[in-house]
Amino acid sequence: PLDTDKYFIVSSDTLCNLNPKLPKVVTTGPASVNPATGKPYGMSFPVVTIQDFVNLQYKLLQSLGVKKLKAVTGASMGGLQTFQWIVSYPDFVEKAIPVIATPRTQAWLLGWGKLWADPIKLDPKWNNGDYYGKAEPVDGVIYSLMLTTMSAQGFEWAEKSFERKWASAEKDPLKAMENDFLVHDALQKAGAARAKTADANSILYLNKACALFDIANGFPSYEDAVKAIKAKVLMIAASNDLLFPPEQVKEHAEIFKKLGKDVSYLELKSPNGHLGGLTAITQASEAITKFLAQ
């Protein structure tokens, strides 16, 4: 829904990209080599925040000579960064389109974050983050990514994709404990595939950054943070998002409105849960085009 013939789009990575093994990923994070030791930082890497990510992006734009942004947008963690942008640099951004995100991480998502992190920490090979050059905590990473995959989808997706089918037509789950259903097999394969390029510590650092996120950080209150915002805001939610439920997104939109902010709300209809914010984003094309043109 973004017209690249009309707008110059800048897209940047963050610190601690979870896939540092990919050749095109040049992020700095716990898997990066500490020049002082010649070894990966591991858990000695400092805790980073969404605000750190945004501050680096601001410095990038300064280096490019950019004086003002027509809009900032992003989905999920990108949505958190979008909210942070309009609080940290209110005079630099005209409009914001946070997708499947809220202005602070709430208890529900904090709980999910623990479920995503603990499989890694419970894998003995994690070794308190000291596994570089050794056997890595692959099992923990796979299970973490399986949980991430499942929680980011919706029940309609599961029913449509797998129903109660067996993983193998010859292996009835009733006949042996190791015989699985198709959904079990699919989650395992998806987790294993993603784990090939993922770094366990990087997952934990991103998880922590998201957990710490709250636009109220550095302000007396959440309301004071909202009052500092000058940008027009279009909040976009997904209908059956388990991670950022539309009810929560709508609640924040109402708070923004009560505090005098120019805010609008749009809900995408999708069977894909949280990922519906990506798979169904074209539903918002007209609204986004009009919003940017205002």
Image (cartoon, grey):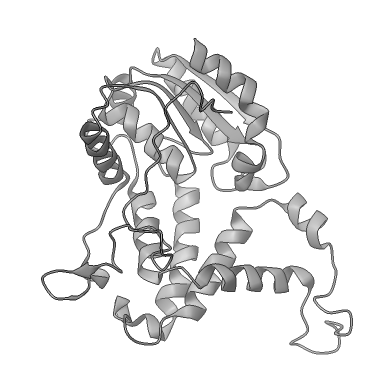
- Measured from the top left, where is residue 289 in percent x and y? 57, 19
Residue at x 58%, y 70% (from the top left corner): 193
Left or right: 205 with respect to 2?
A: left
Which image quadrant for residue 27? bottom left
Q: Is residue 192 above or below residue 212?
A: below
- Where residue 6 appears, as percent x and y from the top left, is 49, 20
User: How many numbered tags mark residues here?
Assistant: 0
Residue that extends furthest to the left in the rendered view of this protein: 36
Task: Specify the quadrant of the image occupied by residue 270.
Answer: top right
Q: Is residue 181 left or right of residue 94?
A: right
Q: Quadrant of the N terminus?
A: top right
In the image, 259 versus 207, the foreground residue is 207
Residue drawn at x 10%, y 71% is 36
Q: Is residue 31 left or right of residue 112?
A: left
Identity of the residue furthest to the bottom in this view: 176
Query: Residue at left 89%, top 84%?
Result: 170
Q: Nearer the viewer, residue 132 or 231?
A: 132
Placement of 89 over or under 205, stated as above or below: above
Q: Is residue 180 above or below residue 16?
A: below
- Point 34% across, 60% down: residue: 205
Given residues 24 and 101, the one toward you in this image is 24
